[in-house]
């Protein structure tokens, strides 16, 4: 339904869009198939939602002249009713579902931000810039609070989009549709004849009774629902921002682990090259085992983080989240224990190998007394470093272990642990096979 209102804002829309109408609304089911009747869905300066029109009984002086009619809100000066021919092929269930979807996505928001209205008109660049600044100024001084929504004809276009019906031959975007676009030749809507009763054309003896429609500005339910949705959207926005920060933190941690893993791999490769140079095949084999163990710990962390994204940012039940938290803590402990153990074993191996090689060098070259003293000091210093690192490692692992001793794991947590461990092992196996074939 298109109407021409009597307010200054309505006159402005008619003038800017160069048409006859200032407002669009749509008759749709309420969404619940058990509730009969249709409702007027619209977006105006009071917000986005339903306008409930109460039936009135119109009598023209005799019983045969009785008609059930509805009063159009705000007494417009012009009106027209349009219908999409494709609606005849839409079943009731799909129509109700489209209504529910429209309500969930668009209802109970405030009227559209003013600058968005300019997307429905075409004007010169200089005029557009001035109009855009004016629209921004209007938005700054708006007193209505809540989530900014759609404008009237955009709401209409979105409903037909949810039905899967094309509204225009040229496939226009919903945010570019003005009320007067709906009567253009390119629009697929057709006029419904004899849909309105003009009170000026009725006989003098005509009378009607029934409930007058409540004006939207006095609709407390709509106002409360807009306030409630505004608060809910603010909470959702805050949660989304927190989730975004958490994702960024996780990415930073993963990048840090990547750096540690790459540095460890470089150290292992360097130690393997030294062991091969000193002709130490047992040492080479040991270092390769270290590399495999560290790689497994790193792959385990990767699998944990990937699954963590699915659990925390997907549609997961609370019970599953709690089980995953238990599993994640245990898996992190295992991964950190493996990687820390490898790093400290590699440090110990580097120190002891260095001592053995220096000792062999000094034994073969018969060092002087001064050189021998320096060697002993170096050996003592290296052993002190090892003891300190070993103590720090045990403290870290003890802390993680104590944090996991608080209770037994749930059955679902055990399933998660088994799944992630197997996934990491499969990735490790594939990587080892790939390296062997190169």
Image (cartoon, rainbow, N blue to C red):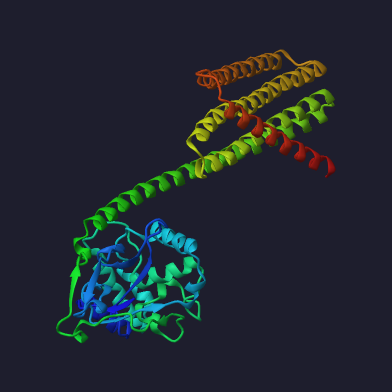
Between residues 72 and 21, which one lies in front from this camera angle? 72
Whether residue 307 sits left or right of residue 207 in the image: it is right
Is residue 347 visible in the rendered image? The answer is yes
Where is residue 78? Give x, y as percent: 26, 82
Quarter in which the N terminus is drawn: bottom left
User: Up-down: is 70 above or below 122?
Assistant: above
Is residue 141 visible in the rendered image? The answer is no
Where is residue 248? Give x, y as percent: 49, 45
Q: Residue at x 23, y 82 (%)?
A: 77
Where is residue 325? Give x, y as percent: 52, 31
Between residues 61 and 271, which one lies in front from this camera angle? 61
Res 76 quadrant in image: bottom left
Where is residue 31? Give x, y as percent: 40, 59
- Total marks placed: 0
Quarter in which the C terminus is drawn: top right
Q: Residue at x 75, y 40 (%)?
A: 431
Whether residue 71 sits left or right of residue 101 in the image: it is left
Q: Residue at x 45, y 70 (%)?
A: 160
Between residues 289 and 429, which one lies in front from this camera angle? 429
């Amino acid at each position: 339904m298109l109407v021409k209102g009597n307010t200054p804002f309505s006159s402005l829309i008619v003038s800017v869009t160069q048409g006859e109408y200032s407002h669009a609304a749509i008759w749709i089911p309420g969404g619940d198939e058990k509730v009969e009747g249709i409702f007027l869905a619209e977006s105006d300066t009071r917000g986005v939602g339903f306008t409930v029109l109460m039936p009135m009984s119109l009598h023209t002086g005799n019983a045969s002249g009785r008609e059930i009619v509805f009063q159009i809100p705000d007494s417009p000066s012009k009106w027209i009713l349009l219908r999409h021919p494709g609606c005849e092929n839409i079943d009731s269930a799909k129509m109700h579902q489209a209504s529910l979807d429209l309500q969930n996505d668009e209802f109970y928001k405030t009227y559209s931000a003013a600058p968005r209205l300019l997307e429905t008109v075409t004007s010169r660049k200089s005029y557009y810039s001035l109009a855009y600044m004016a629209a921004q100024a209007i938005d700054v001084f708006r007193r209505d609070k809540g989530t900014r929504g759609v404008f009237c004809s955009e709401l209409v276009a979105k409903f037909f989009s949810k039905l899967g019906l094309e509204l225009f031959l040229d496939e226009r975007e919903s945010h570019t549709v003005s009320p007067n676009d709906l009567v253009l030749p390119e629009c697929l809507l057709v006029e419904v004849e004899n849909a309105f009763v003009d009170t000026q054309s009725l006989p003098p003896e005509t009378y009607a009774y029934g409930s007058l429609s409540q004006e939207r500005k006095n609709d407390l339910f709509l106002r409360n629902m807009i306030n409630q949705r505004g608060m809910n959207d603010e909470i959702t926005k805050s949660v989304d921002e927190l989730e975004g920060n958490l994702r960024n933190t996780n990415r930073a941690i993963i990048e840090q682990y990547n750096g540690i893993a790459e540095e460890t791999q470089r150290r292992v490769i360097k130690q393997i090259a030294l062991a091969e140079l000193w002709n130490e095949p047992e040492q080479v084999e040991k270092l390769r085992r270290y590399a495999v163990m560290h790689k497994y710990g790193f792959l385990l962390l990767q699998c944990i983080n990937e699954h963590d994204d699915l659990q925390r940012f997907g549609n997961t039940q609370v019970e599953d989240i709690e089980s995953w938290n238990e599993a994640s803590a245990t898996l992190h402990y295992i991964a950190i224990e493996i990687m820390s153990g490898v790093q400290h074993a590699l440090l110990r191996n580097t120190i002891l190998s260095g001592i053995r090689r220096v000792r062999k060098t000094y034994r073969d070259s018969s060092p002087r007394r001064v050189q021998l003293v320096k060697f002993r000091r170096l050996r003592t210093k290296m052993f002190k470093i090892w003891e300190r690192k070993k103590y720090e490692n045990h403290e870290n692992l003890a802390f993680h272990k104590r944090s996991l001793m608080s209770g037994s794991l749930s059955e679902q947590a055990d399933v998660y642990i088994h799944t992630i461990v197997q996934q990491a092992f499969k990735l490790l196996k594939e990587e080892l096979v790939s390296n062997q074939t190169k």
